[in-house]
Image (tube, helix red, strand yellow):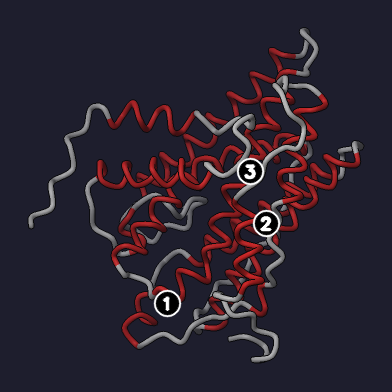
Amino acid sequence: MSSSAAETVPLDSPRVAAADHTARHWTFDKPGPVRIGSPEHMEMFARMLLETHNPYKPRVLDWPKLDPEAHARLTTLPIWDIAVQTEGRASLRVLDYAATITDPLLNAAMVMDGNEEARHKKVLSNLVEAYGVVLEPEPEYTGYRDTEWGWMRTGYSECIDSFFAFGLFEAARRSGYFPPDLVGTFEPVIQEEARHILFFANWAAWQRRRQPWWRKPYFLAKTAAVWAVLIWDRLVLARDLGGSSKQTNFTASSDSIGVSMSAAELIDICLTENDRRLAGYDKRLLRPTTVPFFIRLARRFMPAPRSTQA
């Protein structure tokens, strides 16, 4: 639980509400079009991340007391080891790449991103500690010699995982699978992922556009290779679903949070939540498009969700 009552900031306090609003709404203060790949574009997406930072502290989050049934549902979910380890790897890889960035503004934004990933790991670690979940020993986290590869693998992976996490989180909220107080406590972490994928999508477009002509094919090939690795990872996960899988993705199925719904229903919620969580940021910022595009394409071939009986 919280380290002391005096340190805990109530979730409904004006200070928390103001920080939450700032984290969700941001407009670049320079008017007019912003050319993708330009210095103004980099300034825009870097400042977005820095200026929407929510300064909550993991140790003083107000973890609510759970009734025995809710506590059992939470602690028996087979996701906590994977979740903590995913954030640990992400933080290392982002900070490794940040160390190669010489531009002060972009470096500050990259460091912010990496530190927020580390904070996600701390939030999850504090949650499992608060509710008595026993984790396996953490592995030694390692980066890549090609730090850009590690950053791209983390960024594109988050674009996939966050899209489904947005929908699963909302489905769990609607179903009451988790108590409202616990959902509210975790809400800043979920919104933080929206900021991260927005930052990464703009970095990827900026980096791709500014490559010299002779290096563009290499960068595009690297991007394709990252996607191939991530797709393979998720095919392996799909093969292992139903067993005691310890894979890299923990948002693959609504069953993981005890919510039963059709694929079409889940997709509709994911699409709606993805749009909602990104809606408050400057419209000139590019949105992640690959996952929503292919999900919308797949959705066209699915039956309409069953109607709710009155």
* Of the pair 246 and 15, the residue shown nearer to us: 15
Q: Which residue matches tag 2? A: 117
Q: CA distance from mark 1 to mark 2?
A: 22 Å
* Of the pair 158 and 142, the residue shown nearer to us: 158
Is 16 drawn above or below residue 169 in the view shown?
A: below
Is 259 drawn above or below residue 164 in the view shown?
A: below
Taking the spot 77% from the left edge, 13% from the top edge, the residue there is 215
First reached walking from the N terminus: tag 3 or tag 1: 1
The disc placed on residue 75 is 1
Residue 226 horizontal/vertical position (percent): 60, 31
Q: Amino acid at mark 2?
A: Glu
Residue 82 horizontal/vertical position (percent): 52, 60
Q: Amino acid at mark 1?
A: Thr
Residue 62 horizontal/vertical position (percent): 57, 80
Taking the spot 62% from the left edge, 85% from the top edge, the residue there is 2
Secondary structure under tag 2 reads helix
Q: Amino acid at mark 3?
A: Thr
Taking the spot 72% from the left edge, 18% from the top edge, the residue there is 209
The disc placed on residue 154 is 3
